[in-house]
Amino acid sequence: MNKMQNPETLVIANANKMTARKVQVHYGTNHAIKDVDVDILDKTVTAFIGPSGCGKSTFLRCLNRMNDTIPVCRVSGELLLEGENIYDPRVDPVQLRAKVGMVFQKPNPFPKSIYDNVAYGPRIHGLTRNKAELDAIVESCLKKAALWNEVKDRLDSPGTGLSGGQQQRLCIARAIATSPEVLLMDEPCSALDPIATAQVEELIDELRSQFSVVIVTHSMQQAARVSQKTAFFHLGHLVEFGDTGQIFTNPGDPRTESYISGRIG
Amino acid sequence: MSTVLLLGVVLVLAAMAFVLCRGRALASAGGDMRRLHSLPEAYGWHGALMVALPALAVLVLWLILQPVVIARSVGAILPVTTTTQTADEAQSAQNAEELALMDVRRLAAGIDSAVSSGQMAEVAPDGAGADMAALQEALAASGVALGGAITPETLAAAQKYRSLSAIGLTARTVFTLIAALAGLAAAIMLTQKDFRARNRVEAVIKMLLIAASSVAILTTVGIIYSMLSETLNFFRLYPVSDFFFGLTWSPNFRGNSEFGLIPLVWGTLYITLISMLVAVPLGLFSAIYLAEYASPRTRNVIKPLIEVIAGIPTVVFGLFALVTVGPFLRDWVAQPLGLGDSGSSVMTAGIVIGILNIPFVSSLSDDIINAVPQSLRDGSYGLGATKSETIRQVVLPAALPGIVGAILMAGSRAIGETMIVSMGAGAAAKLDLNPFEAMTTMTVKIVGQLTGDTDFASPETLVAFALGMTLFVITLGLNVLALYVVRKYREQYE
Amino acid sequence: MTDTATPTPTESLLRPSRLMSRRNAAERRFRLYGITAIAISLLVLAIMLFTILRDGVSAFRQTSVTFPVVLTAEALDPSGSLDAAAMAKVTTIGYGKVIDSSFLAFLQAEGLAVDGLSDKDARAILSKEAAGQLRAQVLAEPALVGQTITMTIWTNARIDGYFKGRVTMESAERDGNVSPEQLQLADLLAENGALSRPFNWQFLTGPDASDQRPEAAGLGISIIGSIFMMIIVALLCVPIGVAASIYLEEFAPKNRWTDLIEVNISNLAAVPSIVYGILGLAVFINFAGFPQSSSLVGALVLTLMTLPTIIIATRSAIRAVPPSIRDAALGIGASKMQTVFHHVLPLAMPGILTGAILGLATALGETAPLLLIGMVAFVDNYPSLSAAGALDPATALPVQVYGWAQRSDPAFIERSSGAIIVLLIFLVIMNAAAILLRRRFERRW
């Protein structure tokens, strides 16, 4: 995919991967997400922006049912992955999360070797038949995560010994090793320095060729740089959703404009 | 004056000093509290401490030193020959002297009580001219039973003992009171409005706090010193290598004892192993369930229930082993399998100690599992791992060092457990593989050798100290290792 | 789709894959292990408490026979002076005869007889302890001589065991200490209404009894001993423990010495209790010359043993008081000492007391070190109830449990379990106090 092409024209061509309709989230008595409708397109980077506490991370965690681990959290409405409701009682969240992977704010490599970190997903999901296949997956994922050259000589050393940026790329490699269809990223660069951030952003742009990526970010510049679609959340509402260029240059809602120009948030 | 009365007098003087000094301080400031350096109470406390501390110091010193001094001067007139050369003979001579002194003390106490209750006339100061038989009879009539016949030397020594004690008692009272009064005078002299009473009082309190925290050190020193000295005495009587590498344990109070440690260590380790096989899986799985699966409400009910086990005294577990578990295992397992018909066995003690250790393992593991950061769990769930996969492959490996520490501590507790093994494991020291046989442990033998009449000169008694020392070193080593491992683990996630 | 080896086609989420059902089965199994572990632990706890209750509750009731006893003057007061000193010449044997003849007369009067049961065996169903009690009663009130009083006298432990289900006709056949005929006589007495099972106060207040008289064994001395020890332990442990904790938390400079003390305390908390017993024997009894078996020595040993626990609990209570409180006090010019004693200590007090009570509860149940300092000895004289009583020989509740469990007569297992019930009641009260204290005063910062 050529970076010089105008992203917006490509987006239109891509199919719908995930669809959210009238999604509500309650934390106990707190109504955290109200009536959110979003379409996540295939092979597209979608950015969720908004001030702290606006619900963007909460909504992201609904997309692979990570909120299930919080007992007081209730989700209602319709959330479809390729036309199938992921909150259907027949759906196993474990199986869902293999298709909708997640990368977290703070790099969280397991206290295992670099190899075992990446091989973790394929192993638990039984994706490989032998060691050679697993080796191939680990190598290709580390390459995709632009980490291979840095770690190929020390795959057996612990993942916790890497630098912050390397750890985060290791976590991305770990997430794509299960070959998910959608990759969720919850402020993946907030714990990184500018150089590591640039590397991860470049990586996200490359990942777009294979996955649909959803990224939550605090940085509007980051959203503008990496995404094709942007959703602006405010106080649990989805205020505006559209092409990134349009949201940043010509926002339709005064709240979006205030946020982008730095008056709120 | 009796010790209690003397203490009372000192306390009354201290209270007086409080009132006097407080009043004097106020008077020196013309009744205006604001012109004092410290609060009036501080001057009062200063006075009280000035009275009580020196007086108590004199009293305590006297209480410790008087028996030693008297024993030395009385011992000098006792006819015990101490012209021996070898360590062995010196040891027995020392014991004879101690026994003679004990007789003197008992006789002196007997005469005291008989005289004070009016059943006997006072005896001549040097014991001269007394009728030994009549004296013994008179003492027996007033309820004082003596071991052997009274010799003139013993009687003379006893009389000297009595007179010295009486002098000591008077001198003690006088010196204690002098110290108290001197303190009172000094405190009153010092008290005036610019005196920094609070700082002085606080310095003294701080010294007391330091003294209190040194008790822990003193305890350790006491443990090591008392066991080490008697252990060395034991090794003077019994070869070190025979103790550590001997395969037979057969103490015999008539001599010719064999004190091989190996059978006891084997019994101890065998029982510990079985207890760990019970405690670790049950404790660890309980902890995993409580930490990872249980709802907060279930957790709040189950966790205290499991900890009830930890609050039950070990002797209760001992009775449970003796009355319930032992016969059950014998009738339903050992006999049908032809493995013996002993109610007390390694299995019985091991299982019951294991049960005792369940809450220990589970609460330590629970803490450690909870210390594993949630982000690791999220990372695993985010990749589509199930809960059990996350626990087995992420949480437990991350918590492993801490869990190993917890297991080491549980092992050290099992090794040092006494009541359950003495009631459930039996007393036969042997090297056997059959877990349904009665075997025994170091702790059981310590109890066995030290209860009843103890003669601190015989190897049969002293061996208990060597066992105690071995036990102390083993458990200390395990605990230090465990604390080190756990501390390293906690640092990793802080 | 990509260059990686992932041939899996997109599957529907609604149909679980084969692998997924296997993984979910593993998940359920794992969960089941946890539940099983908890269930086994709690089940064993329940069985243990149940067996102890089952065996022990009956110790609080004692089978007794009520019948008139004729206190014949010739037998009990040969001099006829009604003077206690002169009457004291009559030993328990004389009183035993009085009881025996009164009992036989009572059996005859009521027409209770069993074929093949000799008079000697018939009167043997009464406890041998009765004579001593009657003697004490008569010597206390000499005017009773010559009268006929109605007495309730214990039966011996076998007859008692028969009514508690421990002894049966079959076991009596094989038992040298009781015969089936004696049991039949006991049945007759029960039908007659002379047998009763009143609450056994003697079990709580009486002294220990010899191997042959389990029916008379009581916990009085061990309860007194335990209470003595708890008082001394509390008086020593709490002030020293609190003082040490205050120093370590608030004043100690961070240096080698403090580190040494800290490591030392955590190690002392894990030293096997029996080592403290060795320490007590060597230092307090052998070196310092305190009397063996006395509650003072027991208390000193338990104090040293409990101190690390109390220090650890107190330190965490002190640490839980937020630094802002200290800053506030120091900021208005209080000295460090005033800050600690006026602010930190009162706020930490509930936590300290909770820890102290729990530490005392552990000390109350501790047995092993007390065995070494001679508290397992047979003691049947009450210690004096003054402060000096701490120097008298005594036993302790848990040691009494152990002592009775070591005896051969099965009736002592009942006593032992009964003693555990008493011990557990004490522990429940102490723990409940600790919980209440925590609930009542717990503060969250």
Image: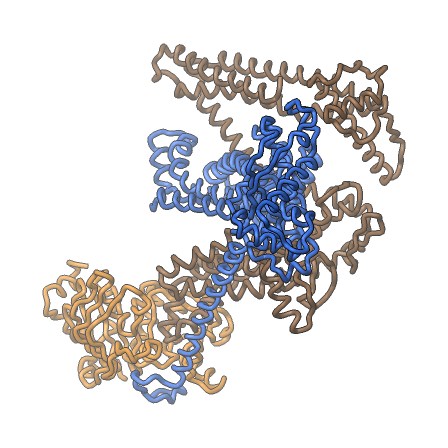
For chain A, the rendered hue is orange
Residue B172 in sight from this viewpoint: yes
Quarter of image, res B153: top right
Report the residue at 37% width, 42% height from top.
C322
Report the residue at 56% width, 57% height from top.
C165
Pick the front one: B168 or A197: B168
Image x and y of residue C129, in percent: 64, 41
Pick the front one: C362 or C91: C91
Pick the front one: B452 or A41: B452
Pick the front one: B155 or C246: B155
Give the quarter of the figure containing the N terminus of chain B: top right
Quarter of image, res A252: bottom left
Report the residue at 74% width, 61% height from top.
B430
Give the answer, above or below, for where B181 lies relative to C208: above
Give the quarter of the figure containing the C terminus of chain B: bottom left
Image x and y of residue B429, in percent: 74, 58
Q: Is residue B147 left or right of residue B411?
A: right
Picture mark count: 0
Quarter of image, res B34: top left
Q: Which chain has been coloured brown in this picture?
A: B
Q: Which chain has been coloured blue in this picture?
A: C
